[in-house]
Image: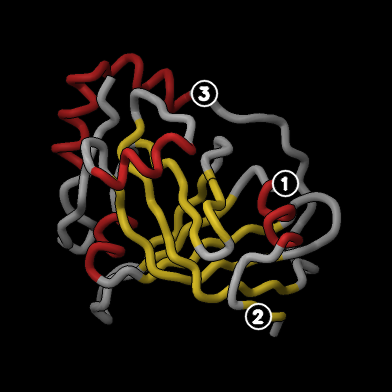
Amino acid sequence: MGKFHDSIKPAHREFIQEQHLFFVSTAPLSADGHVNLSPKGLDCFQISSDNKVGYMDLISSGNETSAHTLENGRITIMFCSFDGAPNILRLYGKGFTVLPDTTEWDIYSPHFKLYSSTRQLIVADIDLVQTSCGFGVPLFEYVGERDIHFNWAEKKGKDGLLDYVQENNLTSLDGLPTKIGLQQD
């Protein structure tokens, strides 16, 4: 079953900082709604305190995390080791979206590397940390980050990115409203 903690301990922090990939999961309250699970990379994750974390979120094809956390706040973030000792770490909590041009943005954004295609920050108050074995997780070798998103964003340009957000990021798959934003130059 694993071990449970009420906060992020130093060993958890060290494990998180060593990972190149993490997964974010959220879900609407509706029993018919779709659970969202998204992989994240680019060294975009930050630990603010033993019970607060966040990540920089780029414009993408959907905005499920924003919609689900706006509706109910529930969020799970999972890290797992693909090299070295097997381990899985889950952070459970309540998340919220932080948009540019807000007081919260001024507080949190200095802790992240921001891009022209940064849509928002997702911040979570963590109330439970779980560690478990990762014996079934296969070994993979990290070879680097992809640059496809940044090439796509550069071709779109600022106006194209704004249009894309308006067309694709206003509602979730299940029709829930989102918070949206775009890092301003």
Residue under numbered circle 3 = 147
- The image's mark for residue 162 is none
- The image's mark for residue 4 is 2
Q: Secondary structure at mark 3?
A: loop
Camera-nearest residue between 87 and 55: 55
**Pointer 3 and pointer 2: residues touching (CB < 8 Å)?**
no
The amino acid pointed to by label 2 is Phe
Placement of 5 over or under 9, stated as above or below: below
Image side of residue 4 versus residue 181, left or right: right
Image side of residue 168 versus residue 46, left or right: left
The amino acid pointed to by label 3 is Asp
Q: CA distance from mark 2 to mark 1?
A: 21 Å
Residue under numbered circle 1 = 18
Q: CA distance from mark 3 to mark 2?
A: 37 Å
- Residue 180, quarter of the rendered image: top left
Q: Residues within 10 Å of mark 2 (few under 14, many from 20)?
A: few
Image side of residue 143 versus residue 23, left or right: right
Residue 168, image x, y percentages: 20, 41
Decide which of tag 3 and tag 2 comes sooner along the chain. Answer: 2
- Number of disc labels: 3
Q: Residue at x 17, y 20 (%)?
A: 159
Q: Residue at x 55, y 57 (%)?
A: 49
Residue 39, image x, y percentages: 51, 50
The amino acid pointed to by label 1 is Glu
Camera-nearest residue between 44 and 86: 44
Camera-nearest residue between 106 and 25: 106
Q: Residue at x 72, y 74 (%)?
A: 132
Q: CA distance from mark 3 to mark 1?
A: 21 Å
Q: Secondary structure at mark 2?
A: strand
